[in-house]
Amino acid sequence: MNDIGQTAMETAVLAKLHDLYKADGFPAADSVRVLRRENTGGGRYVDIDADVEVLRDDGYLDLEGSFIEMSGVRSGMMAVVFLQGRRLRRLEFTVYGGDHWNGEEQGWKIV
C-alpha cells in the first residue's frame, strides 16, 4: 500500500508517543507510513506501518495522561496506537463525552 501522508495532528501524536516509548523502539513520526484513514464522526482510525518492531506486547499504548483539546470538541479526545506482533497497526482517535467530530483538525493542541 502507498503512504498517503500524515496530518499535522497525527504527526504530533506520533511524535509524543515516540517521546514516551522510544526506549521500547517506538519509531520517530517521520518513519511511520499512513496506509488508510477513516473518520467515524466520533473519532478516526488510521492504519499505519513502520519498518521497526516495538518491544511491547500486543495491545494499546496511550499518551500517559495527555489528551487533545480541539475547538468545537467540548470534552476533547484521546489518542492511542494499537500494536500487533510488535508492529504499529493503527492510530485511533476517540472523542470524549459523545461529541461529534467531523474529522477536520482545527484549533487543537496536546495537553
Image (cartoon, helix red, strand yellow):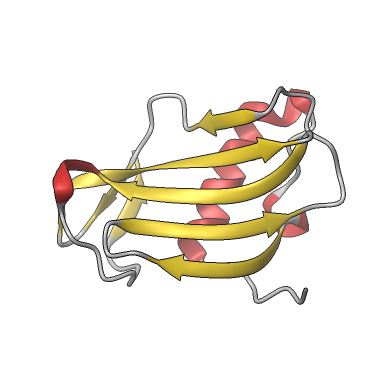
Q: Nearer the viewer, residue 73 or 84?
A: 84
Compared with residue 90, is residue 37 higher up or lower down, i.e. above or below?
below
Q: Residue at x 26, y 71 (%)?
A: 102
Asked if residue 58 lies left or right of residue 46, the reply is: right
State the image quarter where residue 58 is shown.
top right
Q: Quadrant of residue 57?
A: top right
Q: Is residue 101 above or below residue 57?
A: below
Of the pair 47 and 20, the residue shown nearer to us? 47
Question: Residue 6, percent across and down?
Answer: 59, 67
Question: In which quadrant is the C terminus drawn?
Answer: top left
Question: What residue is rendered at 33% in x and 69% in y?
Answer: 103
In the displayed structure, 58 sits above or below 39; it is above
Q: Is residue 31 left or right of residue 43?
A: right
Q: 52 left or right of 8? A: right
Expressed as whole percent of the image width and height from the top left, the position of residue 65 reads 38, 25
Q: Residue at x 41, y 59 (%)?
A: 44
Rendered residue at 27%/64% (across/down): 41
Residue 33, percent from left and from top: 72, 63
User: In the shown orientation, is residue 21 left or right of residue 65?
Assistant: right
Callout count: 0
Q: Where the N terminus falls, by quadrant?
A: bottom right
Up the image or down, 106 lies above or below 60; here it is below
On the image, the x and y values in percent for residue 25 come to: 79, 32
